[in-house]
Image (tube, grey):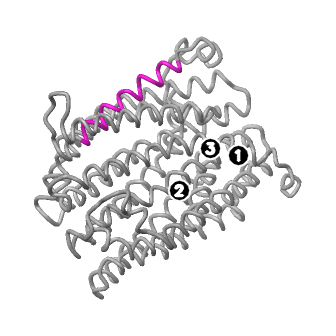
Amino acid sequence: MNIFLNDLSEYKKILKLGIPAIAGLSTQMVVSLIDTAMVGRLENAEAALAAMGLGVLATWAVVSFFSSLATGTHVLVARNYGSKNFLGCGIVLSSSIAISIFIGAAVSAIFVFFSYTIAQFFAADYQVGIFAGDYLHYRFMGIPFFLISVSFRGFFFGIGKTRVFMYSGILVNFLNIIFNYIFIFGAFGITGMGLAGAGIGSTLATICDVIYYISISSTLIMREKFQYFRYFKFDKNIVKSIINISLPISLQNIFILVGFLSFVAITGLIGVREQAASQVIISSLLLTLMPCFGFGITVQTLVGNELGAKNITKAKFYGIETAKLATIYTIFIGLIFTIMPRIILILITDDTNIIETAEPALRIAGFGQVFYGLGVVLANALQAVEESLYVMIADVLSNWVIFVPLAYLLGVQLKFGLLGAWAALPFYVIIYSLMMLTRFKYGKWQKNFSN
């Protein structure tokens, strides 16, 4: 692996793929911050912010279970692309889209129907549950379109076209802000709907995302190279491979997000203000999460391409070095959060009580997130080498056995309040990251792909 350490072109390659992916994901972060800022300025800000925290996490829990189809699509396309099998890339995309349409329609119908039941289950306060149910009702309507866009996203990640995703993020999330403002506060003759308007705006933006990807995929160069429209087919073997890669990730996503929903519910037991403060902190942490996910996308593409080319040594190199770059970023952001958290919080809400409540907890979260880049990047690298089951087990155990129980113990039982609940985060992140590092460096996956 050392033969690559002095080759700056390799790091440029990582950044060339990573920066557009980070930029695209960062636009989602900006939208989340702006949405939170909008909701934080509604009349009943505490209840609305607490409801938004539940609504966003519940939405993530549902869509993340199925959006892991993107990972399966991404990994398979990357391997086919690395071995120059362009027709195979197109067949993977068409099969993935077929799954997304079928699953998306069924899931959307079910969760739209049960949206208020889900909201009340996790809400400690009845009014918070009503607001969250309004948001989820409209947000869940966009699930079919979201999953179709996820299939396209996985395809373009796999062929290294992360700029397509970046432009998608800029366009769609700009529209998301416009739609959300119109439907939250009211404009152009439309009556403001509060938090429910954020759900409608996000769904409309997702529909626009699908239109964008279809238009890009319809260009002559893309159609001739990958031929996904000419040979549009549902390949059972490819579908099986996508599911085998994606299912552990789906289970992992749902367990972890339900774990974080439980954490938000725990902060609700401490108080509505503390629950609202937690939503502000979670929105702030997106400054770290989204770029780390961007590096994760990069490492899956690079590792997948190298596995397709039968170059195991270089696949391992890309995993470790991408994790190092991500960690440099998380150290920088962690210092900002630890030293001057109020600057971040003021951008999200002007409620002094919420800011005062969130500030000390954000310092703790800032320290914990320093180690997050290492864990996320190597988890994505392990998924690219078909270690999804290990990643799922490690994440679920560290979340449910350490993070959630410790948050309840410190925050509620020992009465350390919000500060105690958030003190559980660094323990979770550090243990999880160490498990990812150990498996990637010393696991058996290298021998499996060498055979």
| In magenta segment, residue 215 | yes
> Distance of mark 2 from mark 1, alpha carbons?
26 Å
| Res 36 visible | yes
Q: Secondary structure at mark 2?
A: helix
Mark 2 or mark 1, whichever is nearer to me = 1
Res 181 label: none
Q: Is residue 202 left or right of residue 137?
A: right
Q: Is residue 327 above or below residue 361?
A: above
> Between disc 1 and disc 3, whose residue precedes?
1
Evaluate whether residue 451 shows in this view: no
Of the numbered discs 3 and 2, the one sitting upstream in the chain is 3
* Residue pointed to by mark 3: 19
Of pointers 2 and 1, the one earlier in the residue sequence: 1
- Residue under pointer 1: 14
User: Looking at the image, which residue is at 67% across and 60% down?
Assistant: 440
Q: Residue at x 77, y 38 (%)?
A: 309
Image position, residue 14 (x, y; %): 70, 46
As helix, strand or loop, the secondary structure at mark 1 comes to helix
Q: Nearer the viewer, mark 1 or mark 3?
A: 3
**Where does label 2 land, which residue?**
389
Q: Mark 2: few, some, or many residues within 10 Å (few <14, many ≥20)?
A: some
Front position in the image: 171 or 149: 171
Amino acid on which disc 3 is placed: Ile
Image quadrant where residue 311 sits: top right
Q: Position of residue 363 (x, y in %)?
A: 45, 74
Q: Secondary structure at mark 3?
A: helix
Task: Report the span colored magenta.
Answer: 198-217
- Rendering coords of residue 109 (x, y %): 22, 36
Q: Is residue 355 left or right of residue 446?
A: left
Give yes or no for contact between labels 1 and 3 (Cβ–Cβ under 8 Å).
Answer: no
